[in-house]
Amino acid sequence: MTWPQWIRERVFDNLSYKLVALFVTLILWVTMLGRKEIVTEFDLPIQFLTSSTQVLFGEPSNQWGRVKLIGVRSSVRQFHRRDEALIVDLSRLGYGDHRVRLTKEALDLPLGLRLISIDPEEIDVRLEARLDGE
């Protein structure tokens, strides 16, 4: 077997399969090239969940949080259309002063959207016992 014949067999053997694979690869490449991720920021209200025996005393240190997100444009639009809030669950905390860390679990993010940062990262809250009349 000569060199050119060996190359010819490697290149032209199953040529139709190779062309289909090349075509599919090009389509996937062009599709993924067009899906650019964007970085955006939203100001969201912070909602506090307490148990039936707790009440939030006074105003928390912050009522709004700024989240920085990255993702494809369709996911950002989907997130923007919803009335989203940062939800902080205080029901497992005892009474008194607490510094609560805001995490990605405070958000319900659609598929294709990732959290970069939350500002503020922590919030100071004070929990008191709920009186019967409240």
Image (spheres, rainbow, N blue to C red):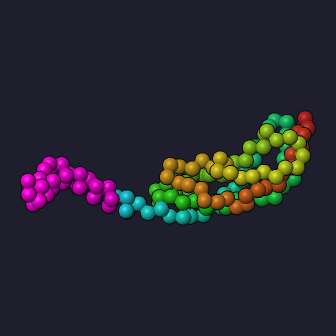
| Residue appearing at x 44%, y 63% in the figure | 36
| Residue appearing at x 69%, y 55% in the figure | 45
Most common SS among magenta residues = helix
Tell me if 68 is positioned left or right of 64 in this view. Answer: left
Query: How many callouts does the rendering have?
Result: 0
Residue 40, position as x, y percentages in the image: 56, 64
Residue bounds of the magenta highlight: 1-30
Q: Can residue 77 be seen in this view?
A: no
Q: Quadrant of residue 89?
A: top right
Q: In the image shown, does 111 or 60 lie closer to the viewer?
A: 111
Of all residues shown, which one is farthest toward the front?
Answer: 1
Q: Can residue 25 be seen in this view?
A: yes
Q: Quadrant of residue 67?
A: bottom right
Q: In which quarter of the image is residue 50?
A: top right
- The magenta stretch spans residue 17: yes
Residue 124, position as x, y percentages in the image: 82, 55
Q: In the image shown, does 126 or 81 lie closer to the viewer?
A: 126
| Residue appearing at x 85%, y 36% in the figure | 53
Tell me if 92 is positioned left or right of 72 in this view. Answer: right
Residue 60, position as x, y percentages in the image: 82, 55
| Residue appearing at x 9%, y 60% in the figure | 4
> Looking at the picture, does residue 110 appear above or below residue 94?
below
Residue 28, position as x, y percentages in the image: 32, 55
Of the 4 image quadrants, the one containing the C terminus is: top right
- The magenta stretch spans residue 20: yes
